[in-house]
């Protein structure tokens, strides 16, 4: 019988230990990365550019992590970092692209393009479900009045 917990066991060749990061930050990244990436891909159709923007956003979030946790709404603050990073990447990659997108448009993208329900959107952007639902309705009415 072998002891799988042998402290003398060497890691496999080529194994690089991941950089040390707080467990809660790792969990945050794992939870939000797929949705952040889906959002970035709407603005940056090139997958490498979208992945780069998300990676840059997470790097900035990591730098500010302790500050964000001390704030009133870390998820909302992280979402703002992501949006700012994606906007900056959009300006660099597509200079003729629309430079600003209102927050309500972002909610519409998350709902109508990416397919997230209001509770999922609330989790991603750091707000409550009722606020998301109301803002989505307002966006839909604003768009419908322009038809």
Image (cartoon, helix red, strand yellow):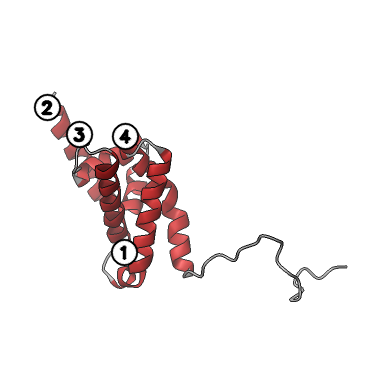
- Assess whether mark 1 and mark 3 are in contact (beta carbons under 8 angstroms): no
Determine contact: label 2, label 1, CB under 8 Å: no
Q: Residue 146 has which mark?
A: 2
**Labels 2 & 4 near each other (Cβ < 8 A):** no
Query: Looking at the image, is mark 3 or mark 1 earlier in the sequence?
Result: 1
Residue on which the image places disc 3: 140
The residue carrying pointer 4 sits among few (fewer than 14), some (14 to 19) or many (20 or more) residues within 10 Å by Cα, namely: few
Mark 2 to mark 4 CA distance (whole Å): 18 Å
Label 3 and label 2: CA atoms lie apart by 10 Å
Spatial CA distance of label 3 from label 4 is 10 Å
Q: Which residue is mark 4?
A: 112
Check the image and name the residue furthest to the top.
147
Tell me the residue that label 1 is attached to: 74
Q: Are marks 4 and 1 in contact (CB under 8 Å)?
A: no
Q: Is residue 140 above or below residue 22?
A: above
- Quadrant of the rendered structure where residue 107 is? top left
């Amino acid at each position: 019988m072998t002891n799988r917990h042998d402290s003398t066991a060497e890691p496999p060749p080529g194994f690089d230990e991941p950089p040390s990061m707080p467990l809660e930050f790792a969990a945050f990244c794992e939870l939000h990365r797929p949705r952040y990436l889906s959002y970035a891909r709407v603005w940056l159709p090139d997958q490498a550019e979208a992945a780069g923007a998300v990676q840059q956003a997470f790097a900035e979030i990591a730098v500010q992590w302790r500050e964000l946790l001390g704030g009133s709404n870390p998820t909302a603050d992280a979402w703002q970092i992501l949006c700012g990073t994606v906007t900056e990447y959009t300006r660099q990659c597509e200079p003729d692209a629309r430079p600003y997108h209102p927050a309500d448009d972002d909610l519409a993208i998350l709902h109508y393009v990416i397919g997230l329900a209001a509770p999922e959107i609330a989790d991603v952007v750091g707000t409550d479900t009722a606020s998301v639902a109301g803002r989505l309705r307002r966006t839909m009415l604003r768009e419908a009045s322009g038809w």
